[in-house]
Image: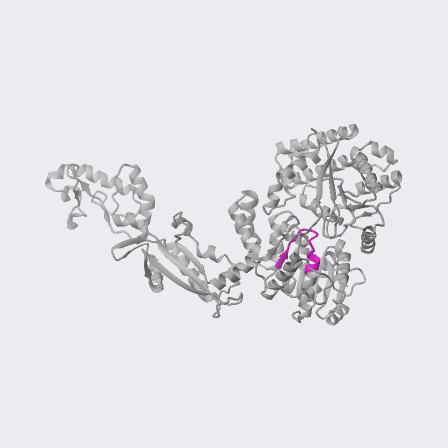
């Protein structure tokens, strides 16, 4: 009951009219001695009624006496009480209501599975729900009745309790869903059950973590099963297949065990070991196990970049010479009925193809039921809207595996695409993922959502890094350093002239056009930092003349010559075909060093033979396009790496460096990155260092550079 009362200032006694006079005006309901106050009391009643949001009927001047439903009490406390207090109108709350606001209703959901005490991932979850009010248990039936009646204030014995009706309704919904859906232990990993069940608890509970409003308890064996997936500890060891011609390192054995474990329990897997730690041999061991155990009833499929298909062929011949392999690549590849016949005879062997070939034949390949489908360099499907990414995600296999040294090469959107391949729909629709994670993490830097995303992906992702001492890799040391070189006068003049010509256009542009201009300017200026002839699109002149126009080219020549003189080998990476050809031209003419240049257009057979020849010491200098030679190749014969020009995504450069710094390397590796002083190269290098923390926190972005402010762009493009 919400009612007005009169208070005697002398005695403190409270007065309300008799029940029969409540609806009458104060002039009739007040005692005779107080009749003189009828006017002010009536006006006060009217004023209070204008504040109240609850229904108050007729009789604006009469005494207020309203019977409120639960939701009206909540509305009064939330909206009217603060306003009345602000107007200096005293509101006296009964003691039970003050205490009820501080009381708590506790809910406990105990989940168990497996009658033998050993929970398996396929076992159905059994829920036992208990409820208590003020330390006294109540039945589930009584709880359901409270929800149905939408009660917010209830009395138990001599005590009153205030409930959060919306949260209780949510718990009721979860109870019904759990009963109808038949959740399994596996669902604990695929659903945020604790989070879903705990909806609303943050506002209701105090800071005492040992006394929660909601408890979600797991049976001990069930907790162990889930923790084993999340921690990857205690995974059963699998005997190495007899057909594997290799001795697995301890961490590789664990990776192999993990892949088999994930297969046995129907979980997709992302093997994201650092470049050079042997993801290939771990996957080959897995494929051999599936075949030798009789577990595979259909062929498996591996899709890889064209640049590494030769490497896969050699690794398969080396580690699994008896494993049947069909190379589906090139103009002479089988199609139609011939392909069907070959696959029939292949049995549970392996089909190896490239992303490009897959796109040409995707209708045939996506129509098949595969055993295992594996993507090497899985970041190739990162752009989820491309036809290639969509087609790959339609592949149907008993088990999906993604291999990548950089699971998030640029944006979280790429992580979504990879996980949509291994578990369709696991991270929800992309729009939902964008709202829940991409925006809060990339825009707002939300640590809470970062932690939540890590928790969601960690059960399905295994990543080991070279610097982890627990792996006991015994790799040689690696030194990375910048080689700073100045601009020549010609370069500086061209640099300033180009900035003056294009800066006004850049500052006026917006959106997509602005990003396009920035990328074009960056590319043009980086070519200018390499050599003026590349910027001016001039033909090559005599080497001595070319070297005089670029200190960077001069330094690359002298360093390379010194390395060759010491009998060592070097990899030179560049983003630009012109720069690679220029380096090759000068080495040949000045030092009689014939250096092959590996680009994306080089035929596979030629590329494979060059890699093999370099590894055998056939030539000392190997020039590589950053994109074509940055992944998949094993070039441990080199113990020097030169990056002729910088990339604004450090992951791309690190992948290229890892062609030499990987397992099999037994010498000190010296990496030099060329930076032209005072130019965008130096400023990008500084920005990369400042943004390195983002890479460690799940994000590696190459797009950040197009989102710089006008002030940041001014600084970026200015010489100095």
Query: Residue 45 sits in which quadrant?
Result: top left
- Residue 625: within the magenta? no
Q: Residue at x 10, y 41 (%)?
A: 32
Residue 368 visible, this orientation? no
Q: Position of residue 26 (x, y in %)?
A: 17, 42
Q: Position of residue 459 (x, y in %)?
A: 57, 57
Query: Residue 47 sits in which quadrant?
Result: top left
For the residue pair 146 and 589, the one nearer the viewer reads as: 589
For the residue pair 450 and 260, the one nearer the viewer reads as: 260
Residue at far left of view: 32
Residue 224 visible, this orientation? yes
Q: Position of residue 625 (x, y in %)?
A: 77, 46
Q: Residue at x 57, y 54 (%)?
A: 458
Q: Position of residue 219 (x, y in %)?
A: 46, 63
Q: What residue span does the magenta drawing correspond to?
A: 269-282
- Residue 270: within the magenta? yes
For the residue pair 331 and 437, the one nearer the viewer reads as: 437
Query: Residue 531 sits in which quadrant?
Result: top right
Q: Is residue 503 above or below residue 580?
A: above
Q: How is the image coloured?
A: one colour
Q: How many marks?
A: 0
Q: Is residue 691 left or right of residue 174?
A: right
Q: Quadrant of the C terminus?
A: top right
């Amino acid at each position: 009951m919400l009612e007005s009362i009169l208070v005697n200032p002398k005695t403190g006694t409270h007065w309300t009219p008799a029940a029969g006079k409540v609806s009458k005006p104060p002039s009739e309901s007040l005692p005779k001695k107080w009749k003189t106050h009828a006017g002010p009391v009536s006006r006060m009643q009217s004023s209070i009624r204008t504040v109240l949001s609850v229904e108050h009927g007729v009789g604006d001047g009469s005494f207020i006496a309203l019977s409120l439903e639960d939701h009206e009490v909540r509305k009064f406390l939330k909206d009217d009480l603060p306003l009345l207090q602000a107007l200096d109108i005293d509101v006296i709350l009964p003691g039970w209501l003050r205490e009820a606001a501080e009381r708590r209703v506790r809910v406990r959901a105990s989940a168990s599975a497996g009658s033998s005490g050993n929970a398996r991932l396929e076992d159905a979850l059994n829920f036992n729900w208990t409820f208590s009010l003020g330390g006294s248990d109540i039945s589930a039936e009584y709880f359901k009745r409270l929800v149905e009646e939408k009660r917010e204030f209830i009395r138990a014995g001599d005590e009153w309790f205030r409930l959060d009706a919306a949260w209780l309704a949510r718990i009721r919904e979860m109870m019904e869903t759990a009963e109808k859906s038949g959740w399994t232990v596996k669902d604990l990993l695929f659903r945020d059950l604790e989070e879903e069940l705990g909806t609303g608890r943050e506002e209701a509970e105090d800071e005492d973590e040992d006394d929660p409003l909601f408890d979600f308890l797991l049976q001990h064996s069930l907790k162990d099963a889930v923790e084993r997936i999340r921690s990857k500890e205690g995974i059963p060891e699998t005997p190495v297949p007899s057909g594997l011609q290799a001795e697995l390192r301890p961490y590789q054995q664990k990776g192999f065990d993990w892949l088999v474990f994930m297969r046995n329990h129907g979980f997709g897997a992302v093997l994201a070991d650092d470049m050079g730690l042997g993801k290939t041999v771990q996957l080959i061991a897995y494929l051999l196990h599936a075949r030798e155990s009789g577990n595979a009833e259909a062929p498996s499929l591996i899709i890889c970049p064209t640049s590494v298909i030769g490497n896969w062929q050699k690794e398969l011949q080396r580690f699994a010479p008896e494993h049947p392999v069909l190379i589906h690549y090139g103009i002479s590849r089988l199609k139609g009925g011939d392909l069907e016949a070959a696959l029939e005879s292949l049995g549970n062997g392996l089909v190896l193809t490239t992303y490009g070939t897959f796109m040409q034949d995707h209708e045939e390949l996506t129509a098949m039921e595969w055993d295992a489908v594996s993507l090497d360099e899985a970041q190739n499907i990162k752009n989820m809207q491309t036809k290639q990414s969509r087609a790959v995600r339609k592949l149907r296999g008993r088990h999906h595996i993604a291999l990548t040294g950089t699971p998030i090469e640029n944006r979280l959107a790429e992580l979504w695409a990879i996980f949509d391949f291994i578990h369709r729909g696991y991270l929800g629709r992309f729009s939902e993922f964008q709202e829940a994670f991409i925006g809060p993490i990339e825009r707002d830097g939300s640590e809470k959502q970062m932690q939540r995303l890590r928790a969601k992906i960690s059960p399905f992702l295994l990543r080991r890094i070279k610097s982890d001492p627990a792996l006991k890799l015994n790799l040689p040391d690696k030194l990375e350093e910048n080689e700073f070189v100045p601009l020549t006068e010609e370069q500086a003049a061209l640099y300033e002239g180009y900035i003056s010509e294009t800066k006004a256009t850049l500052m006026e542009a917006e959106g997509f056009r602005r990003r396009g201009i920035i990328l074009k300017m960056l590319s043009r200026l980086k070519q200018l930092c390499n050599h003026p002839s590349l910027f001016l699109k001039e033909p090559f002149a005599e080497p001595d003349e070319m070297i005089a126009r670029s200190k960077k080219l001069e330094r690359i020549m002298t360093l390379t010559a010194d390395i060759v003189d010491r009998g060592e080998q070097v990899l030179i990476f560049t983003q630009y075909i012109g720069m690679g050809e220029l380096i090759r031209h000068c080495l040949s003419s000045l030092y009689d060093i014939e250096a092959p240049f590996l680009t994306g257009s080089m035929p596979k057979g030629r590329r494979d033979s060059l890699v093999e020849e370099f590894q055998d010491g056939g030539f000392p200098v190997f020039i590589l396009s950053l994109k074509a030679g940055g992944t998949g190749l094993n070039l441990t014969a080199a113990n020097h790496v030169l990056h002729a020009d910088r990339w604004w995504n450090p992951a791309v450069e690190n992948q290229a460096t890892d062609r030499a710094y990987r397992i099999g390397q037994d010498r000190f590796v010296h990496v030099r990155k060329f930076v032209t002083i005072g130019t965008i190269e130096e400023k990008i290098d500084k920005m990369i260092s400042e943004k390195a923390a983002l890479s460690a926190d799940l994000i590696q972005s190459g797009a950040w550079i197009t989102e710089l402010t006008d002030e940041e762009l001014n600084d970026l493009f200015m010489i100095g």
